[in-house]
Image (cartoon, helix red, strand yellow):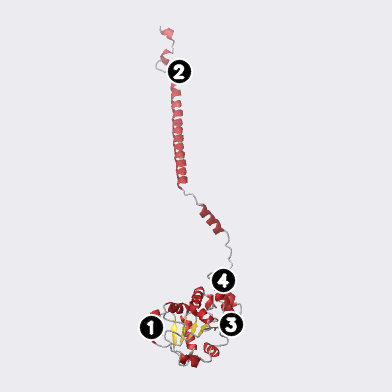
Amino acid sequence: MGDDLGDEWWTQEGKPDASELEEETKQPSEKIKTQPEKRKNVAEKTNKAKKKKKSHVQVVNKKEEPAVPPEKETEDKKSTQPKRKRKKKKTITDVLATSEPKPGCRADLQALVTQFFSDKRSVIEQEELQLQSSCFLSSNDLTHTLSSYLKQVCPKWAKIQKQHTEKSSVVLLVVCSSALRTIELIKQLTTFKGEAKVIKLFAKHIKIEEQVKLLQKGITHVGVGTPGRISALIDKEGLNLQALRYVVLDWNWRDVKLRRMVDIPEIKLDLMKLLDSGVLAACKENRSKLGLF
């Protein structure tokens, strides 16, 4: 029996079969191969998950970003474009600075009155506003002071002021643009007024009630002031035009900006109101006369 097994039977006893060895050698190599494949798959999955999360965040961020309004875009475009220099409009000061001042005349006043009331009065009423040359005093030729001008146009002033006895009225009314100009003109009246009493008729620091009392208290010969306050006094019946003989407009004087009284809209409006409150009517009836100083 021992012979049948051969001499080397004992050497093979306890050793694994060749097929078994092959299987055993295959198993660990397969394990080695499967482990990195698993790791690779896990890594790929995690990368995909990260990419998916990142893309989701980007989408959310894009949604959260506010859209730029078209107005802002146009503003940005405008800011980048070079700014064009706008041409400055010429003011009254610019025009007058390059031209020689011309003395006013009755035609200037008549044209102003006609233009102002053209859209406020009917054709018949506008004709009533037309004044004859006899309604005007001679105009200042820019060589006179107020005193020298008044001496020229009111040669009988001494007699006229003595005859004036009516309260709440004046014989001479000088109309100017401001309180400061009023004070300046009153100073210029020194050599003309004589014994005549002069009153300031402007709104600055003086209540209208005080001026009404002063006019009622005694006889006043000359009133110097702004058209706004003079109109208000006439409306309140603190000043009447019964004794009024002369109305002198401070027409040619110019302020720091070279504007005349009629170049300032609010003062021009007050002046037109004053002329319409009875001055033009008195001139048409030859009770009063208009002069441009």
Q: Secondary structure at mark 4?
A: helix
Amino acid carrying mark 3 in the image:
Ser
In three-dimensional space, the C-alpha distance between marks 4 and 1, rounded to whole angstroms, equals 41 Å
Give the residue at mark 2. 19
Amino acid carrying mark 2 in the image:
Ser
Q: What numbered label is drawn on residue 213?
A: 1
Q: What numbered label is drawn on residue 123?
A: 4
Give the vertical position of 157 relative to 133 (above or below): below
Amino acid carrying mark 4 in the image:
Val
Q: Are marks 4 and 1 in contact (CB under 8 Å)?
A: no
Amino acid carrying mark 1 in the image:
Lys
Question: Would residue 179 appear left or right of 113 to someone viewing this image?
Answer: left
Question: Would residue 158 appear left or right of 81 to someone viewing this image?
Answer: left
In three-dimensional space, the C-alpha distance between marks 2 and 1, rounded to whole angstroms, equals 142 Å
User: Which percent across, then down, holds residue 286?
Assistant: 53, 83
Mark 4 neighbour class, 10 Å CA radius: few under 14, some 14 to 19, many 20 or more? few
> Where on the picture, by quarter, is residue 84?
bottom right
Q: Which residue is situated farthest in the top direction here?
A: 1
Q: Secondary structure at mark 1?
A: helix
Give the vertical position of 77 relative to 273 (above or below): above
